[in-house]
Image (tube, rainbow, N blue to C red):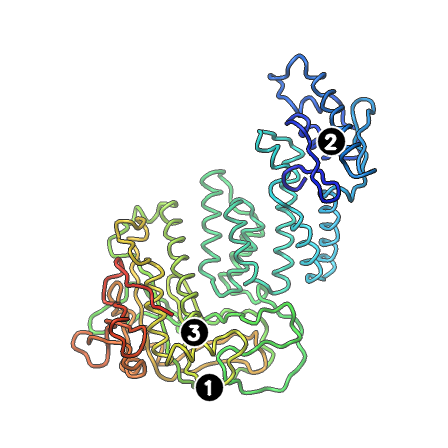
Amino acid sequence: MLGPLEVVSGDQQVPLGGTKQRATLGYLLLQANQVVPTSRLLSALWQADNTPVTARKILQNAVWGLRGILAEGGPEGAAELVTRAPGYLIRTDPDQIDLNVFRRRVGEGRAELAGGRPEAAVASLGAALALWRGPALADLAETGVMWPELTAVQNARLDVLEDYFEAKLACGQHYAVLGELEAAVEAEPLRERSSGQLMLALYRCGRQAHALAVYNRLRATLVEDLGLEPGHELRRLQRAILAHDPSLGLAPPRPAAAPAQPTALAPVPAADQPCERADRRRTLTAVSGHRRHGHAPERTAASRAVIVPQRAVVRPDVMQRQKLSVLLVQARVAPGAIPLHEALRLDRAADLDEALERVSAATRARIEQFGGLVVGSIGPVSLGLFQDEDEDEDEGEDGGGDARREGGSAALRALRAAAAVRDAVTPPGRSAVHRSPVERDLTLHAAVATGRALVRFAPGDPGAPQSVNGALLDLCQRLLTLAAPGEILACEAARLAAGPEVSYAPVDGSARHWRVREVYARPGSAAAAVAYSAPFARPPRRIGA
């Protein structure tokens, strides 16, 4: 029943006959082992103004046909259709119906979740959801069947899906469940519980701005369409995100461990945390406005290094200076592209939010592809760190070491990542004419700086927040404010570290700031060069592997 209606005997599917016969069986199975009055069956099979004179005869023929099918082709003793005043009853073992198995497993999962065993709840609820093959009685729904009982079954699945998300979040699996949550909210945008779960998952992934955007979109829809404000729980969650409330993070008890000086940017999590993801991201904002040579940044952020708490810190933080290459990528709205009265429109704001989210996702993917670590993303700005091989002896198990060895120096990989982001946001061959109006309003700017920065971490505690601070970030931010649409700027140290695989032009005749012109796919291979001097609206070819 959790999909198209099917009766299976052994490995064979039993033919069920025509639409009325199938609908009669489906409706009886929704109330299995209960008497269903004939009047209710007639109402389920025909609308009140469309009931034929021979409706009772048609129903009797359908029942007669189903009895023959269940007696001859169905599993022996699995189901029996009997006449019982004032209607009919289908007698069957509850475990022979997938809907009943689903309900039983859901009850087990909810009991496990209420008892503080989220790992077991994930397994039970996941097994229950795995029984679904599509919408309940999908073949009947396609014929226009709209029974209240069928709607209740569909809504029950959504409730269970939210229970499953809650169990996954309780296990700390916010990265694993993020895609499923986004799909669920897209399909059911007015369900506040799943929207709140998506906000919490985004917050724990270091994406506070995106979490708040989810709230703003839901509130705008509720106010505009229904004249309602979000519920108390969702409003409280929004205030907690704005305040960086520590209760939003995970703080499970952890056995004491001797402090150790880590040599990698991302320490490996303790083996006694089965529910924690090894790739937990750190949250950082390190963007501020500057004025340099008469250039004013289009957007400013007041904080230099604001850490979003994700769990309790159990030991004192340690700071260490490390050699890094820093990449800042920012998507901006072209000056004058969106008038103020247009920007205030809810539909235009939603389109812009979605476009910025696509840029953020592309930036994260390309930074990680080239062996970098995304340590912060706030609004349209993303911060990635790249470390040279000799600075990181512990490569972990995620293949990051291979990416670093194959991709060259940290500065070169940062420049390749910046170019790949621009390529991913505007695919090759897609001119500005073929981009959506919102995409045409966005411009991409990037900057790379190489040097030493102050890294803060908690040794022995892989879930503790990490931040990066210092003059290197200040330099990179000033370069970002100088970058024209579609440009990638690099400092002198990054230019020297990247080697001959990149060619540059000086910025305004300066010998300290450089505009990237070309990034070569292989050292010394001019034929394989990838030009990055074109504007953002006309991107270069993708860098080859």
Circle 3 sits in a helix, a strand or a loop, which is it? loop
Left or right of 31, for residue 440: left
> Residue 450: x percent and y percent?
34, 81
Q: Residues within 10 Å of mark 2 (few under 14, many from 20)?
A: some
One can see residue 300 in this view: yes
Q: Residues within 10 Å of mark 3 (few under 14, many from 20)?
A: many
| Kind of residue at disc 1 | Gln
> Residue 322: x percent and y percent?
42, 85
Circle 2 sits in a helix, a strand or a loop, which is it? helix
Circle 1 sits in a helix, a strand or a loop, which is it? strand
Identify the residue under disc 2.
Answer: 28
| Kind of residue at disc 2 | Leu
| Mark drawn on residue 372 | 3
| Residue 131, placed above or below residue 505 | above
> Residue 271: x percent and y percent?
64, 76
Left or right of 388, for residue 495: left
